[in-house]
């Protein structure tokens, strides 16, 4: 007999638990039934043994439990035999008889209570109340009531312990051939229950609408719109496109530059003339986009930047909050988080501008704030795609400085794509004909962690440098891990909207560039979807667009020919669901919301562009003021921009995923031969309850966006930020030593002899 010993906390004696008895009885009272040394107590435990159904293992072998009268007699005989054995061991027959009588009485009482509870549960089922249903039942497998792991017993402590002991999964005794297609991943999905994911809203639902979405008739299509040529990479950086991993600008061991040392020093934002750059055109102000939408009969028009936040919410819904895959990270990396960052999980908001029969999608900028990375990204994109002499013309002090007229003479290049009623625009940054597909790729300038976590006060993190490939800090591994959690989802969606091949990343600390890396779409999909086959990500993207299309059709039918403000939020429940809120807004209200922080942004830009280098770093360790910690408007001011009387359309969306006709929690390892379809349920919520949920959603969004950094709060008091600042301080000393070595030994570049 297999036994294990547990030492009691308050008692030096050992209490023994018989695991084979647990296997026989499937479930034991809490605490688990003890194997007693005292014969009388052991006899009592045997007499009080409840009658429970069979346990069936994965190998199909049964551990029989008596069910018939004959079997019950066998049990009685076995119990009597046990009682006889106790006498042999020296127990008193009179005491044993009294204990057996007490045990039988207690057993009868438990059976009576169990029967009463069972009758009450059956009565509830007849009244229509929903109860727990195992995951495999939702996939067509009928749960046998004789299975010890069904109907509540399978979650008991004894059954769970038995499963863990033998490393088995609960199975059904049904003869059905249906099986679950669940595949274990780094983060196991939550068990799907039959109970509705929005049952808490059941009393507030006014209208329910169901439907099915597949991709049999609609596919992403490219529009042939003539465009000017797209530039390629300069300084020989195209070598990075065809080498996986990081390409360091300078080898730290040999101190040899792999590329032109000019890339090592970034032009300060105070010297770059941003006034000469072309202004970014939003979807609502893009006449070409609107005309193209009308020409092709499309109803909704958006850009990659305005659509990705909402599409991210659909990813959470369809993937049931799949955790990120970090197998690309080394085993020694200490950070074990597998969730997306706080900023990425925040509710998404957008405006739907009505214009001549079409609706333009703009991102909601109510809580936007300025930072240096917005400016630096524009200037660095120019540096990476232009010869040195031409790029220097953007310097304010250059004698032949480029003019705004020259800059505007070269129009931007875009890709236009359609799916359903959507037309999507994507700005093109760079091109190389040797890459697969269209050869297009996106340029991304990625600041180091010390800058990203406090971009408003970037001066504190200027000394932080990347020195190693792996490690918790000052490594490319740290930056890659943070990109997985904070940026890959957004990057991959932008790549898909623009029909690109991947992204080219330049790692920097605002002052210096440390290295480059080309990350293809399959590599991003590996971290996001657990597979390098882009079929899963492509299918999810297209299903998201079609599901979004259905929602917007319903909203615009409720408020025809009106501009709207919408919020989308996927809630992390046992079965995820999405809140959707829509309200009509006027042009003046949109302008008020979009320009809410305009004055603060302009003031920051003025301070930034007139910034002078600081002497010393004594002030860098001082706590930040309250003014610096509040980059956006206080919550009390939010109510001023909202209309006093408004019509609100609140909905709750839940979906079911089907792969090849079989329901799954989330698709895994999808291939081109698989068919993924979605059944959705869209429930309209009553006005009063919808207003309450809407206010809560807006509050959650503000709290998520009202702090700087990707995933940190309370910057001044945060230990993590303090650590980054200390590393930056040491990095500034390291840079001084490196500069001294360069002055003494000179600079060597690859290719020079």
Image (cartoon, rainbow, N blue to C red):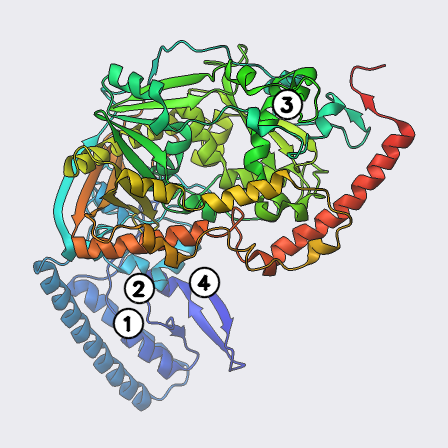
Judging by the rendered image, the residue that carries numbered circle 4 is 2
Judging by the rendered image, the residue that carries numbered circle 1 is 49
Mark sitting earlier along the chain (2/3): 2
User: Residue 84 versus residue 266: which sits nearer the camera?
Assistant: 266
Mark sitting earlier along the chain (3/1): 1
Distance of label 2 from label 3 (alpha carbons): 80 Å
Judging by the rendered image, the residue that carries numbered circle 3 is 394
Distance of label 3 from label 1 (alpha carbons): 86 Å
Asked which quadrant contains residue 353, the reply is top left
Distance of label 3 from label 4 (alpha carbons): 79 Å
Q: Could you tell me residue 690's position as x and y percent?
A: 22, 53
Label 2 sits on a secondary structure element that is: helix
Q: Could you tell me residue 224's position as x and y percent?
A: 36, 10
Distance of label 4 from label 2 (alpha carbons): 15 Å
Asked which quadrant contains residue 492, the reply is top left
- Give the answer, above or below, for where 732 lies relative to 406: below
Q: Which mark is residue 727?
A: none
- Give the answer, above or below, for where 62 lies relative to 36: above
Q: State which mark lies toward you, 3 or 1.
A: 3
* Label 4: few (<14), some (14–19) or many (≥20) C-alpha neighbours in 10 Å: few
Is residue 332 visible from the viewing direction of this image?
A: no
Judging by the rendered image, the residue that carries numbered circle 2 is 25
Q: Could you tell me residue 107's position as x and y percent?
A: 23, 77
Q: Is residue 171 left or right of residue 238?
A: left
Residue at 36% across / 23% down in the picture? 286
Mark sitting earlier along the chain (4/2): 4
Q: State which mark lies toward you, 2 or 3.
A: 3
Circles 1, 2 touching at the beta carbon (< 8 Å): yes
Q: State which mark lies toward you, 3 or 4.
A: 3
């Amino acid at each position: 007999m297999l036994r294990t010993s547990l030492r009691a906390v308050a008692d030096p004696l050992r209490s023994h638990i018989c695991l084979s008895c647990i296997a026989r009885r499937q479930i034991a009272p809490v605490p688990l039934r003890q194997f007693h040394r005292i014969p009388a107590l052991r006899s009592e435990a045997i007499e009080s043994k409840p009658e429970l159904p069979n346990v069936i293992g994965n190998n199909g072998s049964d551990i029989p439990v008596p069910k018939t009268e004959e079997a019950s007699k066998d049990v009685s005989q076995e119990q009597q035999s046990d009682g006889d054995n106790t006498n042999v061991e020296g127990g008193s027959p009179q005491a044993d008889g009294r204990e057996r009588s007490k045990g039988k009485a207690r057993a009868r009482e438990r059976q009576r209570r169990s029967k009463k509870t069972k009758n009450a549960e059956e009565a509830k089922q007849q009244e229509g109340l929903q109860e727990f249903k195992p995951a495999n039942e939702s996939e067509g497998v009928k749960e046998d009531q004789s299975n010890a792991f069904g109907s509540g017993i399978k979650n008991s402590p004894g059954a769970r312990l038995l499963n863990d002991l033998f490393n088995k999964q609960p199975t059904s005794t049904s003869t059905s051939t249906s099986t679950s297609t669940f595949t274990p991943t780094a983060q196991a999905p939550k068990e799907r229950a039959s109970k509705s994911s929005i049952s808490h809203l059941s009393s507030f639902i006014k209208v329910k609408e169901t439907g099915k979405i597949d991709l049999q008739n609609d596919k992403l299509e490219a529009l042939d719109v003539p465009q000017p040529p797209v530039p390629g990479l300069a300084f020989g950086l195209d070598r990075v496109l065809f080498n996986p991993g990081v390409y360091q600008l300078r080898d730290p061991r040999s101190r040899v530059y792999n590329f032109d040392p000019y890339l090592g020093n970034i032009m300060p934002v105070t010297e770059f003339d941003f006034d000469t750059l072309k202004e970014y055109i939003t979807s609502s102000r893009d006449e070409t986009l609107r005309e193209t939408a009308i020409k092709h009969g499309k109803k909704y028009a958006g850009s990659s930047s305005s659509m990705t936040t909402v599409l991210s919410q659909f990813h959470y819904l369809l993937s049931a909050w799949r955790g990120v895959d970090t197998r690309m990270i080394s085993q020694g990396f200490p950070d074990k988080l597998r969730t997306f960052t706080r900023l990425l999980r925040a509710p998404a908001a957008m405006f739907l501008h009505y214009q001549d029969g079409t609706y333009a999608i703009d991102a909601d900028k109510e809580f936007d704030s300025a930072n240096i990375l917005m400016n630096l990204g524009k200037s660095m994109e120019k540096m990476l795609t232009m010869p040195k002499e031409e790029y220097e013309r953007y310097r304010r002090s250059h004698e032949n400085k480029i003019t705004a007229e020259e800059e505007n003479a070269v129009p931007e290049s875009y890709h236009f794509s359609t799916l359903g009623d959507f037309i999507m625009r994507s700005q093109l940054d760079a091109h190389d004909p040797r890459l697969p597909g269209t050869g297009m790729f996106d340029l991304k300038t990625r600041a180091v962690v010390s800058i990203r976590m406090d971009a408003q006060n970037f001066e504190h993190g200027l000394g932080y440098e990347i020195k190693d490939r792996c490690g918790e800090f000052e490594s490319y591994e740290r930056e890659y891990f943070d990109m997985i959690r904070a940026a890959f989802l957004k990057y991959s969606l932008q790549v898909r909207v623009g029909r690109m091949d991947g992204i080219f990343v330049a790692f920097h600390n605002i002052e210096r560039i440390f290295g480059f890396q080309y990350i293809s779409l399959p590599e991003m999909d590996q971290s996001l979807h657990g597979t390098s086959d882009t079929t899963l990500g492509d299918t999810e993207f297209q299903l998201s667009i079609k599901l979004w299309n259905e929602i917007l059709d319903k909203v615009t039918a409720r408020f025809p020919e009106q501009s709207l403000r919408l919020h989308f939020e996927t809630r992390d429940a046992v079965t995820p669901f999405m809140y959707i809120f829509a309200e009509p807004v006027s042009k003046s209200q949109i302008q008020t919301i979009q320009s809410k922080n305009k004055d603060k942004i302009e003031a920051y830009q003025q301070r930034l562009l007139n910034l002078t280098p600081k002497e010393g770093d004594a002030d860098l360790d001082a706590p930040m003021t309250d003014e610096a910690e509040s980059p956006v408007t206080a919550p009390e001011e939010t109510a001023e921009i909202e209309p006093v009387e408004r019509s609100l359309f609140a909905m709750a969306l839940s979906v079911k995923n089907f792969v090849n006709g079989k329901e799954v929690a989330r698709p895994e390892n999808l291939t081109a031969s698989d068919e993924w379809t979605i059944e959705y349920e869209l429930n309209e919520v009553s006005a009063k309850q919808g207003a309450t949920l809407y206010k809560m959603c807006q509050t959650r969004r503000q709290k998520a966006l009202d702090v700087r950094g990707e995933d940190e709060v309370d910057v001044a008091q945060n230990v993590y930020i303090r650590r980054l600042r200390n590393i930056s301080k040491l990095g500034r000393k390291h840079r001084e030593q490196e500069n001294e070595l360069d002055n003494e030994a000179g600079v060597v570049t690859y290719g020079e002899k």
